[in-house]
Amino acid sequence: MTPADRVDDARSDADEAPADEAYARAYASGYEEGLRSGLRDVLAHASRGRTNQELRALILGRLARLAEEVDLKRRSLLGPPAPRAFDDLLRAPRPPGVPSPSAPAAKLVGPGGTLLVREVRPARAVDVARASAARFPRLVVVSPRPPDLAGVPCERIVVPVRSGPESDGGGSGPGDVAGRLREPTEAPGGALVYVDALELFATEAGPELTLRFVGWLTAQVQRTRSALIASYDPRALEGTDAGRLERLFGDVEDRTEPARLAPP
């Protein structure tokens, strides 16, 4: 076979099996996003003054979850979600007096109860907190934008949550919030705790620390006969992390769907 014949054969093979441009673009997009996500995490932790040992531990933890994250990325490439603006994480509650569409009558959460409401904007969870507040001597609101809960028949305590490095006093991370929740929940009669800051916690502190905080809080309210109502945008966490979050609650409810028990 002459060199000219080999060139013709190569051209023929290329014509018969052209490169899949759509696949290549999707692969490159996923690869780029993976690099961006990893570098953003390292940059965020470095900006908070982490030591080399802490950074090494965080990076090793991220590497340990790499296979899981690759599978999540594969699923997202099959049906990529619409990008979200960062401001969406600071979910503005429904304006007072505006009823939530197709919302059933507000249920009640009693001592030891934990409820997670999946909703894009805090609405249903606010209604449940307002209806349940009379069962407790105090209501603690943990929110970057506290909803209007004026007029509830108990003491109201607001724990504002701000974006920014906790070490610089610019933000309120899960550790700081946990410290501020001990006293009201352990006081006589306990407290009803309303939280709609999980998306901000997951972005600022990471999913693992957020899940540990929620695990501690659910155990704390059950131990002290308090209660927890959390509003959660299901777009904030992906795959396994979302399932782990929901399993921490005794009851999980969609904004426009009947309540269901969390899976064991």
Image (cartoon, rainbow, N blue to C red):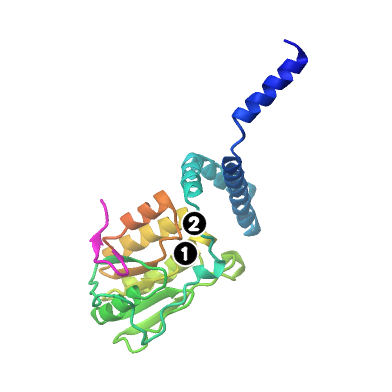
**Nearest the camera: 238 or 65?**
238
**Nearest the camera: 77 or 117?**
77
Q: Which residue is mark 2?
A: 81
Q: Earlier in the sequence, mark 2 or mark 1?
A: 2
Kind of residue indicated by mark 1: Glu
Q: Position of residue 135 (x, y in %)?
A: 23, 79
| Quadrant position of residue 102 | bottom left
What is the residue that sits farthest to the top in this orientation? 1
| Quadrant position of residue 148 | bottom left
Q: Position of residue 190 (x, y in %)?
A: 29, 73
Q: Secondary structure at mark 1?
A: helix
- For image coordinates 59% across by 65% down, the residue present is 165
Residue 116: in magenta span: no
* Horizontal arrangement in the rendering, residue 261 relative to residue 72 (left or right): left
Residue 262: in magenta span: yes
The count of marks equals: 2
- For image coordinates 48% across by 60% down, the residue present is 202
Q: Secondary structure at mark 2?
A: loop
Identify the magenta region.
253-264
Q: Position of residue 111 (x, y in %)?
A: 23, 70
What is the residue that sits farthest to the bottom in this orientation? 151
Q: Say which quadrant the N terminus sits in.
A: top right
| Quadrant position of residue 257 | bottom left
Kind of residue indicated by mark 2: Pro
Q: Which residue is mark 1?
A: 199
